Each structure stands twice: as C-alpha cells, then as structure tokens.
Amino acid sequence: METIQYKCPNCDGPLEYRADIQKFGCEYCDSTFTNEEVRKMFKDNENTDLSQNIDETAGDDDFQNGNLYSCTSCGAEIMTDAETAATFCVYCHNPVILKGRLSGDYRPSKVLPFELDREKALEIFKAEMGRKKFTPSDFMSEQTLEKMSGLYVPFWLADCRTTASMSGTGKQIRTWTQGKYQYTETKEYAVERRASIVCRGVPADGASKIDDDLMDATEPFDYSRMQDFSMSYLSGFLADRYDVDKGEVFPRIREKVESASKSLLNESVSGYSSFSATNKNINISGTEWKYALLPVWFMTYKYRGRMYEFAVNGQSGKLAGNPPLSVRKLLVFAALLCIGIAVLTGLGGALLL
Ligand SMILES: [Zn+2]
Ligand SMILES: [Zn+2]
C-alpha cells in the first residue's frame, strides 16, 4: 500500500502537526512550518488523484488485503486495521499516512485540526478523573496514561431541512379576591406552531469500534474552525476512515434533529401559565451530507476483562467516559463502614449505661 510521510526539509526528521502552535513542527531540529508552506512543499501528496477509490487489492499477494504497508523511513512491513488511515510505524515511530484509505468515497471534505495538545488533554483527564472515588489503583498510572493518543474520528455531518408543526392548549389562569370571595379565571387558547427549521452540521461518528454515546458526549465541536481536507493534518496522529455508512447513522441524526426541533417549538410558546401539546410533527424533507475528520484524544483502559473508553474533545477539552469502580476498594470501604457502625453502636451502648 502506498504511504505518505511528511519530512522536514531541513533535517529529514518527521514533520508533525502541533496543536499548541497550530503549525507543523520537526522535533529533531525544531523548525516550524505553516499549513501553506507544507501544502506547497508537498503538493505532490495533495495533487495525487484521490477522487477515485484506489484499488487496494491490486499488487502482489502479501499486499493483497491492503493491510500491509512498508515504512519509507525504516523499511519495516507493518499490518494495520482495515480502517486505519494514519498511524505510526511501530519500529521507528515515524508518522505514516496510508494514502489509498482516504481516496474516492472515503476522502473527507473537511478536517478540524487539533487545537488541544496531548499535555493539555492529559491535564484535563488527570484533574477530572483524579476526583473520582474508588477507581482501580493503576487507573491513573503512567502506563495507562501513555496510551492516550490523538485520533481523527470519521464523522458524518448532516444539514437537515425539516418542517415542524405543533398544536396544543395554552392556559392563562388569574386569581383574585373580592370581598369574601376568591375568583379564578381560566382562559384557554388553541396554540398552533408551524416552522421550517434547518439544522446544520448534526454529527454522528462513522466508526463502529468507538462507542456512539462516548462520541456524542464529546460534542459540540466548533465547525467554524474546520479546514478543507489535507493529508498533512494527519501527520503525527492516528486517523480512521468510516466503516459505518451515512444511511446507517441516519437514525441517530434523525433523533438529534427531532429533539432539537421539538425544543425550538416548545421555546416559541410563552406567556401562558401552562401549556400542553396534543400533537407534534417533525418531518425531515432533505439532508445534505459532509464527511469530516474530527479530533479526539482517545484512551482505553481494561479492567476485569472489560474495556473502558475515554475521549477528550481535541478542540474544547470536554471529557467523556466513566472509569470502573475497583471491587477491592469498594469491599475495603464497606468493611470500614461496618467497623465504623459497630464502634458507634458500641459507643452508643456505652453511653446508655
Ligand atoms: Zn528538522
Ligand atoms: Zn519505520
């Protein structure tokens, strides 16, 4: 499989995108380059025709499944998952981009470059997870934390046009006292709402191996910072292409659009003491799709045979994921609690005497 590597023109070291300075940097000689400079220097990488699906099954037998590539820095042959689009050579740790994986239907139109670097992501993770009680002792160990890696997750972003309508009854209630009588006046209004709503950039990830709820919990992303896709942004990160098609994510998109439209309709009703809706209708009449790569600092942790996933939004720093509870720590806590109660009961008994 053909690979792309971005190398420093000054020292031939690997060039990686650095979130902290929003530029490309060489860790060997400390040179930095802007996006424009990198695009110019490596215009061949960008210009290769990626509008067609590159046939990864072509070639000799070893490469037949397209999951084997050779590192252009050290020559080692490395296996990858079928979805991997950017990774590191396991031997020399140079960043490698697998060109064919993002060609044709798999070519993203947009990418949101990382804005939060690994150090900041780790800081957020340590601060928030450090507050959790009863986590296993090795949960915050160096060994666990070093697994955190920058991953571009394939996302479907949908622009949905909807027609929404709602009918219901609004009540206005007024009470007053006159003489020895208290009066209550109830006015009922028939409320009708009709709206055309456009929801833009409704996201759903297209990676089957990452938990949907986890990805939903890292939202929102600020799309105004999105860039036209360029391979170079992937240098120094992991990236996957989608394996869940837009048709398959549509139910998730529809759910989000319906709930956003319903809240909009509800918010538009005001001035009543109470309101109850009898009928709500949301119809999606048209959808336009974008396929983009969004940045996430991703980490897994295995405890008692189960895998726990964590993700930090690579732009906002929002953390998602729940750590496991340590069975041992919980037992110790329960035992201490029992001892505490026993002592208190003993004391109580002693006081009564
Ligand atoms: Zn260099
Ligand atoms: Zn290598």
Image (tube, grey):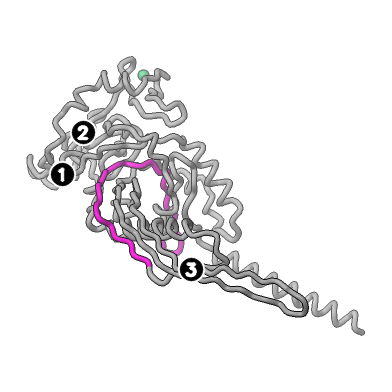
Q: Hey, which quadrant is residue 239 in on the image?
A: top left
Query: Would you name the residue on which mark 3 appears?
Result: 189
**Kind of residue at badge 2:** Thr
Alpha carbon distance from label 2 to label 1:
12 Å
Q: Which mark is residue 3?
A: 2
Q: Position of residue 10 (x, y in %)?
A: 33, 15
**Outermost residue, bottom side:** 353
**Kind of residue at badge 3:** Tyr
Relative vertical location of residue 307 with respect to residue 121 in this rendering, above or below:
below
Q: Is residue 229 left or right of residue 330?
A: left
Q: Under tag 1, what secondary structure?
A: loop
Residue in the image at 60% along x and 67% along y = 330
**Outermost residue, right side:** 353
Q: Which mark is residue 66?
A: 1
Q: Earlier in the sequence, mark 2 or mark 1?
A: 2
Label count reads: 3
Alpha carbon distance from label 2 to label 3:
67 Å
Whether pointer 2 and pointer 3 mark residues with C-beta atoms closer than 8 Å, the reply is: no
Q: For this rendering, which residue is in front, 251 or 295? A: 251
Q: For this rendering, which residue is in front, 70 or 158? A: 158
Residue in the image at 10% along x and 41% along y = 55
Give the position of the C terminus as an image quadrant: bottom right
Q: Within the magenta stretch, is there residue 303?
A: yes
Q: Is residue 54 left or right of residue 138?
A: left
Q: Earlier in the sequence, mark 2 or mark 3?
A: 2
Q: Earlier in the sequence, mark 1 or mark 3?
A: 1
**Kind of residue at badge 1:** Gly
Residue 147 appears in the rendering: no
Q: Position of residue 88 (x, y in %)?
A: 31, 37
State which mark lies toward you, 1 or 3. Answer: 3
Q: Which residues are magenta?
A: 280-306
